[in-house]
Each structure stands twice: as structure tokens, then as C-alpha cells.
Image (cartoon, rainbow, N blue to C red):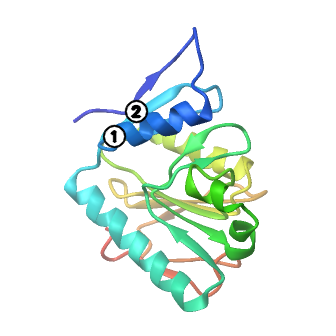
Amino acid sequence: MMNPVEVKFDSFQLTDEQFYQLCQDNRELKFERNARGDLIIMPPTGGETGNRNIEIAYQLQSWSRQNDLGIAFDSSTGYKLPNGANRSPDASWILKERWNNLSSKKQQKFSPICPDFVIEIMSPTDSLKATQAKMKEYIENGTRLGWLINRKTKQVEIYRQGKEVEILDYPQSLSGEDVLSNFVMDLKLVW
């Protein structure tokens, strides 16, 4: 299995348009950029991880449609965070009012907004330290609630604005708390 590869460009930086075009020209790969502009190349997920990703996206989308408070997004969605990083969580959600404040043009590419809620599921090739750093980056850039699901250890790390990370051992469900009112993620199929 291929681990994510970080590529540093000392001699040049990709513009936002160049980065977007790189992603469009190489759809079989998933790219992210950190706040320094270093390119991170991520391999496609394996079957197990892909199945778990669609399960969490399905549950989030179903809830989002029922309450109509915001917009849910899948793992192929890229965001331009306030710190300059381009990130793509496994699932995310944005309040409808915040999303609608973006122009149509900004909604079409890598939207310059940080999601209100994010989920990352550890895949076998992911580094726990790097994924934890990414979760902290989301919180520092405006995410109000984030879940890092680690299937290997059967733990969930919950990230919240202004609070210490909470670690749950083998939870069967997770609450969307006040960010996703009345949302409960069933984890039985994720484990």
C-alpha cells in the first residue's frame, strides 16, 4: 500500500488555479496542500475504507436532507481553508447560510470556507499524527465539531472549538451535539 506523499516545492508555488487544474487532470489521485503550499498526494482508498466513507456520507446526507439546515459533502470535496491549506475531509457539512454567502463561482471550485463539521476515517495508510494535526487545523480554521474515527483502535477522537480532544473507546453512536442538532451517527456498520 502506498502512504500519502508530501512533495515540497522550494522553487515555486502552485497558484490556486494551477492546483485546481492539477486535481482535475489527475482525478484518480487525491491532492491536498498544507498551509506552506506543500503538495500532499494521497492514493485512492481501498475497498473497506471506501465502503466506510460512503456509509458516513450517506448518514450525514440523509440527516442533512431531513433538516435542511445545511449542505453535506463527500470525500471528493476540496476546501481552501483560511490559513491557505487545501483540505478534503472524508465527509463534511456547512450551514446553509454560510454556504449561500459564497458566490456561485466560489462554490464551483475549492470553496474558500472551512466546514462547520468534518469527519476523517483513518485508513491503513494514514499516519495518526498527521491526521490528528489535520483535525487540529480544521478546528483552528473554524470547524466547530470534528470526528476522527480510528477503526484499528476502535476509538473516536472528538474535536471541538476551545476544548480538549475527547477520546471515546468503541462507541456505537456519536451525537452531532449543538452543531448538527439531533444528528446521531450509527457506527455499527463503520466498525
The mark nearer the N terminus, 2 or 1, is 1
Residue at position x 54%, y 91% from top?
66
Q: Is residue 46 left or right of residue 31?
A: left
Indicate the amino acid at tag 2.
Answer: Ile
Whether residue 173 is visible, yes or no, is: no
Give the image location of residue 82, x and y in percent.
Answer: 73, 44
Say if 117 sits above or below 17 in the image. Answer: below
Q: Quadrant of the N terminus?
A: top left
Circle 1 residue = 29
Q: Residues within 10 Å of mark 1 (few under 14, many from 20)?
A: some
Give the image location of residue 32, x and y in percent.
Answer: 50, 38
Q: Are marks 2 and 1 in contact (CB under 8 Å)?
A: yes
Give the image location of residue 81, x and y in percent.
Answer: 67, 46
**Along the viewing direction, whichever of 162 and 40 lies nearer the viewer:** 40
* Residue farthest to the right, as pictured: 162
Circle 2 residue = 41
Q: Is residue 6 left or right of residue 145?
A: left
Q: Quadrant of the C terminus?
A: bottom left
